[in-house]
Image (tube, helix red, strand yellow):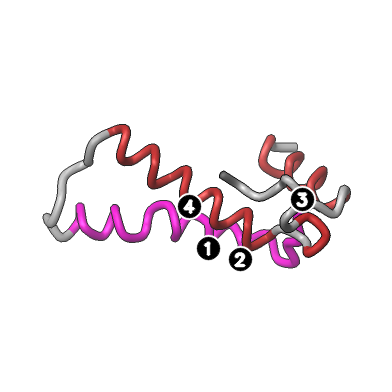
Amino acid sequence: MTLARATYTAATSARVLRIDDLQAASDQFFGMVLGTPQLRCLLGLRGPGDPEDNKRFVLNAVARFLDGCRTARNIGNGHAAA
């Protein structure tokens, strides 16, 4: 079992996250992380970017994704991303 699947299994079993379709959620997450930066690089509109800016972008995408998957009982009780 991969770390991602083990984390998913633990989080959904504990009812912290609700993800009905893991494949679709994975595709959506990778789209959030890679979509705009990768497209801009492919179109020659930007280079690889500053590592710190890239890190902030990825952390923001992770927080937004997890906030969207969080169950109602875990919203606003300390589980929300900073």
Looking at the rendered structure, the kind of residue marked 3 is Asn
Q: Amino acid at mark 2?
A: Ala
Q: Sequence order check: which comes first, mark 4 or mark 3?
A: 4
The residue identified by callout 2 is: 24
Q: Say which of 4 and 52 sits in front.
A: 52
Q: Amino acid at mark 4?
A: Ala
Residue 39 coordinates in the image, percent (x, y): 26, 60
- Tell me, yes or no, whether the two marked residues, 1 and 4, touch with CB atoms within 8 Å: no
The residue to which callout 3 is attached is: 77
Q: What's the CA distance linking mark 2 and mark 1?
A: 6 Å
Residue 44: percent from left, percent from top = 12, 55
CB-based contact (under 8 Å), mark 3 and mark 2: no
Local packing at callout 3 (Cα closer than 10 Å; few below 14, some 14-19, many 20+) is few
Q: Which mark is residue 61?
A: 4
Instruction: Give the Cα distance between marks 2 and 4.
Output: 16 Å
Nearer the N terminus, badge 3 or badge 1? Answer: 1
SS at mark 4?
helix
Q: Residue at x 62, y 53 (%)?
A: 66
Labels 3 and 2: the sequence-earlier one: 2
In depth, the one of 2 and 32 nearer the eye is: 32
For residue 5, the mark is none
Secondary structure of the residue carrying tag 1 is: helix
The answer to whether mark 2 and mark 1 are in CB contact below 8 A is: yes
- x, y percentage for residue 55? 39, 37
Q: CA distance from mark 4 to mark 3?
A: 21 Å
Q: Give percent across and percent down for residue 73.
A: 83, 60
Picture quarter with the C terminus = top right
Residue type, label 1? Gln
The quarter of the picture where residue 38 lies is: bottom left
